[in-house]
Each structure stands twice: as C-alpha cells, then as structure tokens.
Amino acid sequence: MVKEMLSRTRIRRKLRFARTRLREWRMIAKGLLSTGHPILAHIIPMRRCNLSCAYCNEYDDHSKPVPVDQMYRRIDRLASFGTTIVTVSGGEPLLHPDLDPIIQRIRQDGMIAGLITNGYLLTAERIERLNRAGLEHLQISIDNVLPDDISKKSLKVLDQKLQLLARHAIFQVNINSVLGSGVKNPEDALVVARRALELGFTSTVGIIHDGNGQLRPLRPREMEIWEEIMSMGKRSFSRFNQFQHNIARGKPNDWRCRAGSRYLYICENGLAHYCSQQRGYPGIPLEQYSVEHRRREYHTRKACAPRCTVSCVQQVAMIDNWRAPQTLKPVAAPAAEPEPLVQLAGVGLREES
C-alpha cells in the first residue's frame, strides 16, 4: 500500500514538474526578450515565526498575519508588473491562516508559486492542501544534524517531515544546508545533503553571511565540503555560475544587481525593498511602485553587490549581466520599519535562495 502511494505521488510530481519546467523555460525566454518585468518577488504574509534561530534577522515573535485581502492586492499588483515567480516567505508563512488561498491567487494570476518554510508545521494533511493550492516549489533549510543553541532546524527534528514530503508532495522540494560562521559542525551539511538526495529531493548549500548580507569566506574543510555538495546530484540553476564559487573563496563578484527591478522583496508592510538584507531601500509602497521606479533600479549600481551573498538576487541578474551597464547611483533614503525585528548582534545570517 505504501509503495503504491509513493508510486502515485512520484507520477503526480513528475507531471507537475514537467509543467513547471516548461513555464520556467518560458520565463527565461521572456526575461531575455524583455527587461521590463520582475522575474522573482519574495512576499511576506507575516513576520512572526515559531522558532528563534540566533542568526536570523527576518522574524519577530508577535506580528499578526497580513489580512488576506491585502495579500491579494499585493499579488495582483505583482501580476500587473508581469512578474514570473512569487515566493512566499517570512517569518514562518505556514502560520498564516490563509496561506492556501494566497498560493491559489498566485497561480490564478499566472505566476509560479514557491514557498520557503522551516518545515515544523508540515503534516500529511497540510502537504495535501499545498498540493491542491497549486504550490510548485518548496524549500527548507536545515542547519545541523542535532539542534543547538543557534538553530533548532535540525535533521533529527525534521527528518519525519521530510519523509512526509517524500510520500505526499507533488511539488518540487529543495533542501538547503549551510556552511560558514555560526555552523558548529560543517560535516552536518554533507549529512543533510545526502539525506535530501536519498529522499528524491534536490539539494543546495548556502553560505551564512553577516548582518548586512555580506561575504564571509569558508575555511579549508568547509571549502572541501562545499565542493563535494556542489558535485552531488543533479545540476540546478543556482549552480550554473561562478558567483557562488567566489563567495566560498571569499572573493568579490563583478555583477549587475537588478534588485528593485528584476527582483523585488515585499515586506509585511507592503513596501518594496532591494532584498531582505537591504530593507528600507527603496522602501516605497508596492501600490506606488511604478515602471519608472523599476527602470531606474535596473540601471542603478548597488554598493553592496560585490560582496553580497543573497544568491536568489544574483541568479535573477544572470539573465541581464551581459547587457545594460549600470550608471546611476541610489537616491532612496532608508525607510524605517514600524516594528523592530528580532536580531542578535554578532551572529551571521543565512543566504537567501
């Protein structure tokens, strides 16, 4: 019975993957033909999280969920820009009571729907609901094999959740392991990556960055582990560039960051930012964010770019790195967040995916 269920799940997963991959190739073609639309947007439906990882500056412990009608307006606004992919993040998005209709709205607007979660709240029933909502990509970052004082997102705690995903999820699942400052045992990343591949998921590895999203080079053993994980399994879009290898070696990158244009980060207050590590720039309400804003940011050189480790922004920029030199300087001043987020000083933060 279990084998039959697994077989059916794999078939359904392959079918959805084939449809999603076709849409992704269309996304690349559209991105090459036109520079006027965002390729990827991260949107935050709530900032509260059920965990309190010491490295993270992207959560609080009290915020209420954004009302679903406001989320619909923001998603529709992103769709009006021609946005291709919308990834729901947090905080912990599974805490939002209306996450399923939020994902459905993304799909109804013709965009690819992704989700970044810590995985703690996943159950078989919850996974089936995500299937029905039309989710296409899900990512979980696992920081260690055993929980410690830095992070509770351990393989020991989450392995049962991964098994549920293997049995029930028809969307693509990526497991991200981490290396860098704050990781006590770098060998854990290998264990996590091998387990992900064993369960039929894709595996990536991220490098923890500092509080400004900036570079911290890997030590020799971490570098060896990095190379081994990068060589494991199928190649993914995130591995087709020298960017990550330079990060691992502590080298700056020469690239054209298109944040604020091709990539948007929409916080829980409905403001458009460069990314999670540059909140406040430009800090303009999404409903007021115009074609002119996006066009200017497309041509604006960002001072934080050379040592940035926010890989999803760089992946998006790959489509445009060969064209449109950036000649403008940022003009926006930081816009303060209404509520301070939980942040522990002196502890590294993770790479976005």
Image (tube, grey):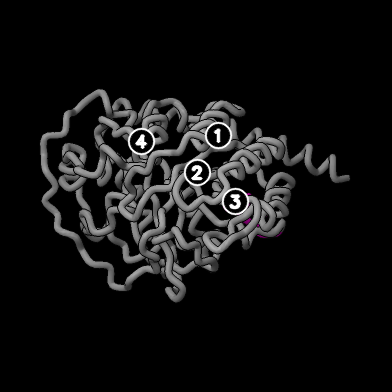
Q: Which of 246 and 76 is in front in this view?
A: 246
Q: Which residue lies furthest to the top in this view?
A: 322
Which residues, given as a range, are shown in magenta?
125-133
> Mark 2 vs mark 3: which is more N-terminal?
3
- Residue 44: image quadrant is bottom left
Q: Where is residue 199 in the image (x, y as percent from the top left)?
A: 71, 39
Residue that label 1 marks:
225
Residue shown at 38% from the left, 66% from the top: 343
* Residue 129 falls within the magenta-colored stretch: yes
Give the CA distance from mark 4 to mark 3.
23 Å
Q: Nearer the viewer, residue 87 or 178?
A: 178
> Mark 3 vs mark 1: which is more N-terminal?
3
Three-letter amino acid code at the position of disc 3 = Asn
Q: Position of residue 95 (x, y in %)?
A: 54, 67
Q: Where is residue 279 in the image (x, y as percent from the top left)?
A: 28, 57
Q: In which quarter of the image is the C terminus?
A: top left
Residue shown at 66% from the left, 35% from the top: 197
Q: In which quarter of the image is the N terminus?
A: top right
